[in-house]
Amino acid sequence: MVTALAPRYARTTVRRSELRTLTELVGPATAGRAATVELTGDPGSGKTALLAALAAEARRAGRVVLRGLGGGTAGQQAPFWPFVEALGTLDGLGPAQRDTPADGAGTALPPAAGLLRRLAQPPEDPDTLAESGGGLTRGCQYFAELRRLLADCAAAAPRGLLLVLDDFHWADPCSVRLLETLIRRPVGTGLVTVVAHRPRQAPVGLRLAVRHGVELGTVDEIGLAPLTLDQSAELLGAAPDTPALRRLHTRSGGNPLYLTALAAADGDPDDLAHLDARRDLETRLLAECAPLTDDERLAAQAAAVLGDTFDVEAVAAVAPLRHGVACRTLGALRHRDLIRSAPGHGALTFRHALLRDFLYAETDACWRAAAHRRALDHLAERGAPPLDLAPHVVRSGTLATPEDRAVL
């Protein structure tokens, strides 16, 4: 059993190689060259923690650091929200930085006020602004002005400006268009932009803009791979040759969030570090599931009842939902990367077993028993083997008949 978790900052320190690469890539901005870095990884892979470590390094080097989030469901409705939030962090610089203006950190950045005003005053409806074409359209001129104001902000930071945009897969179309402008036409000053996102959830416009930047040579890419066994051992404070550690590493797929949650489930339930790890996972999954519509949540819960793999027909029968509704809702869940394709024709599975467990546990117990009854009927009609039917017989409770129990 793995009984101890290393401190929370270990999620960053175990990715020392990625942090070193990030630091090296953003370095040229101090020499007056603009740069954009794309950081990608699955949910829970450690992108945000890595960005926090990068921001701390940049502040120690005397740079001004601005951080903004894609915004989730609220941010999706607010034009330019990641940039607005990033500029709003100017007043959040620490006291130590304010006491050392010669280092460049804590710079007032006078152009920032003008940039904020222009972000709040688009020349046309935001819904059409992001789609405006090239040439001398008002939209094109507006984005060129925003680019110039960002360049002015960078020029006002003596040791460079680091713009960190996290969760950009949730960014609004106007923010994606502004990032595309910066990629296509780098400002040519000490600005470096690091944009982090989940590639499976990123909108097409963002993926195309970044891909074009890679081809132009204005974007560098970093993808977070699963943790190695040694990194998992360091994160959990365990020896890499222990069977328990190897089992946890395999079950987690090398994902730091899932790894710590699985270790917490195996550990002392009263240990504060383990409680923190479990709450961290629950909070993140709640945030991911909060925007789901009623039909999407119902489909996800029905899928959780079905088990490791499922398909449209089974979800429609268990939810229950009309086939067309089930098909659309499962498509929406795939777009959110809550479920993924599995081996087999039309088969689907959850992104991770812990996500399925979470959705299953939050269902109403009475509904869940009835859902298992519907799953049992559906699978029996399809000729499923007794091994597949047995879990649903057990979990149907009083709804199971004597004939059903004969399967056991």
Image: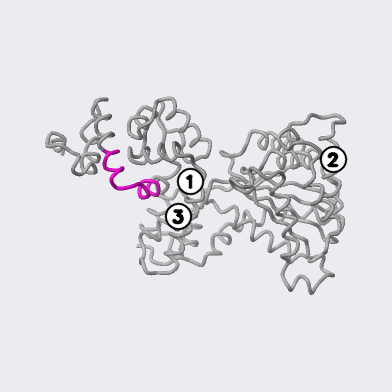
Identity of the amino acid at label 1?
Cys
Residue that mark 1 sits on: 289
- Decide: marks 3, 1 in contact (CB < 8 A)? no
Residue that mark 2 sits on: 144
The structure residue drawn at horizontal position 72% and vertical position 54%, both measured from the top left corner, is 86
Image quarter of residue 95: bottom right
- 361 in relation to 296, above or below: below
Q: In the image shown, does 186 or 391 lie closer to the viewer?
A: 391
Q: In the image shown, does 324 or 4 lie closer to the viewer?
A: 324
Image quarter of residue 197: top right
Q: Earlier in the sequence, mark 2 or mark 3?
A: 2
Residue that mark 3 sits on: 282
Q: CA distance from mark 3 to mark 1?
A: 10 Å
Secondary-structure class at tag 3: helix
Q: Position of residue 341 (x, y in %)?
A: 45, 33
- Is 241 placed left or right of 165 in the picture? left
Within 10 angstroms of label 3, few (less than 14), some, or many (20 or more) residues?
Answer: some
Within 10 angstroms of label 2, few (less than 14), some, or many (20 or more) residues?
Answer: some
Q: Position of residue 382 (x, y in %)?
A: 27, 25
Q: CA distance from mark 2 to mark 3?
A: 42 Å
Q: Position of residue 31 (x, y in %)?
A: 84, 55
- 229 in relation to 309, above or below: below
Q: Quadrant of the N terminus?
A: bottom left
Identity of the amino acid at label 2?
Ala
* Residue range highlighted in magenta: 357-372
Report if residue 361 lies within the magenta region: yes
